[in-house]
Structure formats: C-alpha cells, structure tokens
Image (spheres, rainbow, N blue to C red):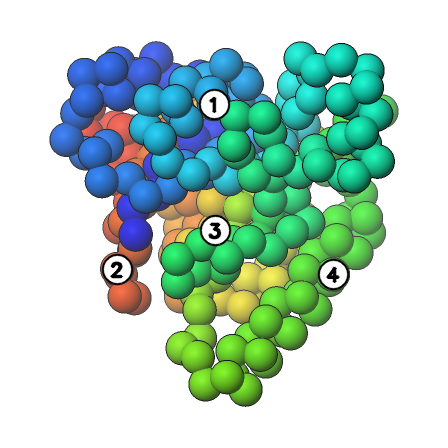
Amino acid sequence: MKILAVSDKDDSKLQACILQNMQFLQDVDIVISCGDISKSYLEFLVDSLKKPLFFVKGNHQTFHPSDHNGYLEKFISDIYETDKHLSFGGSNLHARVEQFKDYILVGFEGSMKYNKGPFQYTQQEMTKIVKKIETTLYLIQFKDFILRRKKRKVIAVSHAPIVGIHDQKDLCHQGFARFKVFLNKFKPVVWLHGHIHFNDQRNAQITKINQTLVVNAYGFHIINISDDNVDVVSNAKNLL
Ligand SMILES: [Zn+2]
C-alpha cells in the first residue's frame, strides 16, 4: 500500500508534482493528513488524486467540517455527529477506528494543552481517548481471531508526537505518554505524526521503534508498505 502523508504546511512542491502528474504519485492508494493543513489544500489533493482522505486536526486547525454550510446544516450535523466526515469526502480519524484494505487506521487529533485554544489535551485527557481506542482494537482483533482472519496491521495517525520520539521540551511540543503505551501494545506498522516543524526537509525525522516506523510527515512523505517492509520516500530524496 502506498500512502501520501501530509502535515503542517500547504506544500507548493507537492502541488507542482501533482499538476505535472509525476510518476511517484500515480499509484498512491490513500492520502493521510496529520493536521494543520488548509481545507482548500486538502480539497485540491482529493480532487486531483481522487483517493480516499483520512485526517486528524492539528492544534491550529481553523476549518470546521460544515463551515460553508448554513445554520440548519450545522445544527443537523451537530445532532447526528456527521462532522466526522468532511463535505469533500475526507474521514476524520480522531478517536476512531477505520478499516481500509488490510489495515486498521486509528487517529488522535490536537496537541498538548498549552493555552485555552481548541484541539488541545492534557496527558490525562489523551490517555482516556487512547484507552478507548485500545479497547476497540482488542475487540476487533479478538473478532478476527475467532473468525480465523489474518491479523490486520495497524496504522496510527496523530498530530502530536509520541513522548520521547521527535518531540520537544516545551509544553506545546511535548509528546503524549499514552501514545508510547499504544505503540508497545499494538506495534503499528507505521505511526504518522506532524506538529514538529523543521525548515530543511533533508533533516527528515524517521525513527524505527521495534516494528514501528515513526514518521514526522511535515510537508509531505510517500510511504510504501509491503508485507513487513516499510519504506519512506521523502520529498527531499525525490525532489531536492
Ligand atoms: Zn501543531
């Protein structure tokens, strides 16, 4: 499976590659956004590539799924909680489990709470959310076991990093501790996050922790998963 992961900036280089219909983008299966990306940029990716989009919101997310709808649509959306799906077809992964091909996707939005802004969580608040997903995953894995299905691999998506991996000391950029517990329990094949910005993408942050490849998706990255192999092709390697 080939993933186009984007995060934290609307990347003009990627837009140019898409407009030129470059080879490395042609067999992308899925687009994953780790947050803090504009709605118009996500719409451009979905419209151009015509692939499913899964996303989590970053701490600077300004769009609301129904921000171009009227009050009535927003009212209905709030009642039926349809805001997990954007109008252009993207699926919000936050605190949810989605099944895509042979993989199970899970997602966690936002960052550590550092002011009164939206999409921020304390360690305790995020721990509660992650534990809920852990229970759901155990149930899915148990069901797969009973039905003698092949164990499906997990792909984790978050805006904030995992504690101790690519995170920083200041409160805003600290990683969540429960992410590490989740990583050790479920051994996702890949963990995509954003939130940590770096100016030169040749300094890509890609770290292997046991069986999991942890990738800071800042800008954009292409990730290939085949059996137990995970390869990351950053834009730096492709384009610079
Ligand atoms: Zn952020």
Give the residue displayed 45% in from the left and 54% down from the top. 100
Q: Residues within 10 Å of mark 4 (few under 14, many from 20)?
A: few
Q: Is mark 1 within 8 Å of ligand 1?
A: no
Q: Tell which circle, 4 or 1, labels the residue nearer the N-terminal end.
A: 1
Residue under label 2: 226
Q: Is mark 2 within 8 Å of ligand 1?
A: no
Rendered position, 87 above or below 107: above
79 sits left or right of 16 in the view: right
Q: Amino acid at mark 1?
A: Leu
Q: Position of residue 129 (x, y in %)?
A: 75, 53
Q: Tell which circle, 1 or 2, labels the residue nearer the N-terminal end.
A: 1
Which of 26/87 is in front?
Answer: 87
Residue under label 4: 132
Instruction: Give the foreground label among 1 and 2.
Output: 1
Label 3 and label 2: CA atoms lie apart by 15 Å
Q: Amino acid at mark 4?
A: Lys
Q: Position of residue 170 (x, y in %)?
A: 68, 32
Q: Please tell me in which quadrant of the rendered image residue 120 appears.
A: top right
Residue under label 3: 191
Q: Please tell me in which quadrant of the rendered image residue 141 appears.
A: bottom right
**What mark, if any, has residue 42 been given in the picture?**
1
Instruction: Give the foreground label among 1 and 3.
Output: 1
Rendered position, 126 above or below 31: below
Q: Please tell me in which quadrant of the rendered image residue 149 appears.
A: bottom left
84 sits left or right of 164 in the view: right
Q: Tell which circle, 3 or 2, labels the residue nearer the N-terminal end.
A: 3
Give the residue displayed 84% in from the left and 36% down from the top. 79
- Please, what secondary structure does the residue beneath circle 1 have? helix
Q: Tell which circle, 1 or 3, labels the residue nearer the N-terminal end.
A: 1
